[in-house]
Image (cartoon, coloured by chain):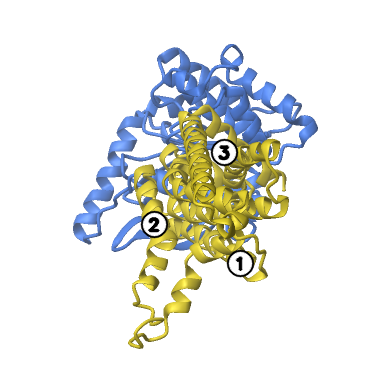
């Protein structure tokens, strides 16, 4: 445990003395502010329009959670796809580039401790990112009455999806000594599992439409992070989704460990 | 007591034999110079001894522990300075050594003393709070050495410890290495194997040399015996390698290649 914490602590420390952490956190905060504001303005406009046309039914349905917080979280999820790889790219690749892997692998520590330490550092970082989003959502509680449960569930969804993406990024970083390659690899992987898979299902390859399908739709949908995130976003905590995120993290951890070991066995 | 033992160590990269059938044993308290021309397999051997690279064949024992069967116990006994010092450029010297102390299992209560001792021994006191990136090459090399001794390991494996240093620094590092192996309160404590291709370095600090060429052992003798015949180490070195080349002409061998780090 001491080893694991030492690895995690050192990793976080290095992130915060490098410009990467600050660039990412600054961009993330600025974008969070921007999307929060735009969600707020659009909510306000729709409210004004609805009352102007007297759409009572619509007005009755409108609430801060579904029409402001959810789209806001959704936007931040998209931002995550592009910003997270910058954080995860160095996790393992840096060790190889510095030659410090030689120190770690000849120290009396186990590889799983190194992997777990790196993952922990990554998770701590995205926890901070999620907290920033939470701060903006929290502002609404000062002026309105959003549902606490739903707001937090959505935030949990964002946190879990960040954990899964961080795990994917760590795996990519374990495969190469070049941070740029790790960055591109992660971004492509995230775009595929985050955006492309659901899109493929939607255009009907999966077989939900037209009867020409071969029934892979549900599977493809299940692999993608999007539906699991959306369930949490809508305020539902389903064990299936929690298990999904846990499995993604576990698979990536096991593969990262295998990747680190295989480099030396070649 | 044997501190380092290599038994029939071999490393193959595809069709290339980087190290083949290398055996030697080093007793506690000895300082051994590990010599050989560039690409002879010195770094590969050291990486196998430390467990960084798995051997294709054979086994290595550190303080009685097989490096792949009891990796944790074996690695605890090793202080290793790789060819390039394994430094985190963004950390301070103090922060870095404290981190190394943690992963080398130095007890929390002794960590501060261990770090202070390593700083003192390597002459790093004045730069302790500096960021490693800003240090000169000589200081970085010393930080690398401090890293290897911070947990006071019985076995030191040093891959070209004086490379890139100026003459004064070289002298300091050498005296440090000699000091580490010299008896302390009546007992020899550190065993040192250091690779180099600087011959007078060997003459200055080593008691014994192991010379390898093309991945094979060419010579293993106490230094006193080697130079007893009045010949210089350089001549011995050149002849051992030449002899090897003649024999490899007779029976063609695959050339040894040391992989890029």
Query: Mark 3 and mark 2: span between their CA atoms?
Result: 26 Å
Horizontal side of B49 relative to B190 (left or right) equals left
Q: Which residue is mark 1?
A: A241
Tell me the residue at 35%/76% (across/down): A204
Label 1 environment density (alpha carbons within 10 Å; few <14, some 14–19, many ≥20): many
Q: Tag 2's secondary structure?
A: helix
Sequence-wise, which precedes: disc 3 or disc 1? 3
Asked if labels 3 and 1 share a chain, the reply is yes
Image height check: is A145 above or below B10?
above
Tell me the residue at 39%/49% (across/down): A182
In front: B170, or A214? A214
Asked whether the residues under the numbered discs 3 and 1 touch, taking CB atoms below 8 Å apart as contact, a structural biologist would say no
Colour used to depict chain B in the structure image: blue
Residue B31: x %, y % from top left: 55, 34
Sequence-wise, which precedes: disc 3 or disc 2? 3
> What chain is the yellow one?
A
Q: Tag 3's secondary structure?
A: helix
Q: Which mark is residue A191?
A: 2
Residue B191 position by quadrant = top right
Residue A149: x %, y % from top left: 72, 54
Q: Tag 1's secondary structure?
A: helix
Sequence-wise, which precedes: disc 2 or disc 1? 2
Label 3 environment density (alpha carbons within 10 Å; few <14, some 14–19, many ≥20): many
Residue A142: x %, y % from top left: 70, 36
Q: Chain of mark 2?
A: A
Number of disc labels: 3
Query: Mark 3 and mark 1: span between their CA atoms?
Result: 29 Å
Q: Which residue is mark 3?
A: A11
> Which residue lies most toward the right here?
B109
């Amino acid at each position: 445990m001491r080893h694991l914490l030492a690895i995690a602590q050192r990793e976080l420390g290095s992130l915060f003395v490098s410009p990467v952490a600050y660039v990412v956190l600054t961009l993330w905060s600025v974008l969070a502010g921007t999307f929060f504001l735009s969600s707020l303005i659009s909510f306000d406009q729709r409210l004004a329009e609805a009352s102007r046309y007297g759409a009572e039914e619509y007005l009755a349905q409108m609430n801060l959670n579904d029409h402001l917080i959810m789209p806001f979280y959704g936007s931040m999820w998209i931002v995550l796809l592009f910003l997270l790889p910058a954080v995860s790219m160095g996790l393992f690749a840096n060790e190889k580039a510095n030659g410090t892997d030689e120190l770690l692998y000849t120290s009396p520590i186990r590889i799983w401790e190194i992997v777990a330490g790196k993952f922990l550092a990554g998770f701590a970082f995205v926890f901070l990112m999620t907290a920033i989003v939470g701060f903006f959502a929290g502002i609404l509680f000062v002026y309105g009455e959003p549902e606490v449960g739903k707001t937090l569930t959505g935030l949990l969804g964002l946190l879990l999806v960040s954990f899964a993406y961080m795990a994917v990024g760590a795996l990519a970083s374990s495969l190469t000594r070049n941070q740029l390659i790790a960055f591109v690899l992660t971004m492509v992987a995230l775009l595929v599992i985050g955006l492309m898979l659901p899109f493929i299902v939607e255009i009907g390859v999966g077989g939900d439409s037209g009867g020409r399908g071969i029934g892979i739709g549900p599977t493809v949908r299940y692999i993608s992070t999007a539906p699991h995130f959306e369930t949490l976003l809508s305020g539902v905590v389903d064990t299936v989704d929690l298990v999904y995120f846990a499995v993604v993290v576990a698979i990536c951890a096991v593969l990262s460990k295998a990747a680190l070991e295989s480099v030396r066995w070649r | 007591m044997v501190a380092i033992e290599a038994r029939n160590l071999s490393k193959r990269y595809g069709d290339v034999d980087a190290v083949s059938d290398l055996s030697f044993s080093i007793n506690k308290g000895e300082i051994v110079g590990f010599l050989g021309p560039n690409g002879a397999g010195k770094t590969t051997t050291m990486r196998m001894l430390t467990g960084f690279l798995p051997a294709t064949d054979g086994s290595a024992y550190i303080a009685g522990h097989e490096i792949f069967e009891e990796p944790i116990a074996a690695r605890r006994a090793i202080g290793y300075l790789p060819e390039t010092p394994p430094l985190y450029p963004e950390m301070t010297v103090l922060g870095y050594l404290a981190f190394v102390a943690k992963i080398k299992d130095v007890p929390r209560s002794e960590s501060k003393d261990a770090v202070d001792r390593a700083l003192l021994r390597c002459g790093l006191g004045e730069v302790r709070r500096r960021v490693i990136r800003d240090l000169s090459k000589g200081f970085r090399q010393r930080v690398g050495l401090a890293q290897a001794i911070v947990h006071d390991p019985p076995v030191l494996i040093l891959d070209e410890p004086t490379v890139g240093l100026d003459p004064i620094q070289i002298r300091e590092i050498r005296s440090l290495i000699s000091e580490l192996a010299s008896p302390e309160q009546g007992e020899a404590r550190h065993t040192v194997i250091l690779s180099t291709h600087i011959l007078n370095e060997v003459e200055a600090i080593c008691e014994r040399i192991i010379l390898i060429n093309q991945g094979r052992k060419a010579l293993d003798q106490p230094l006193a015996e080697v130079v007893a015949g009045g010949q210089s180490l350089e001549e011995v070195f050149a002849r051992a390698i030449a002899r090897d080349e003649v024999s490899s002409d007779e029976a063609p061998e695959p050339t040894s290649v040391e992989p890029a780090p």
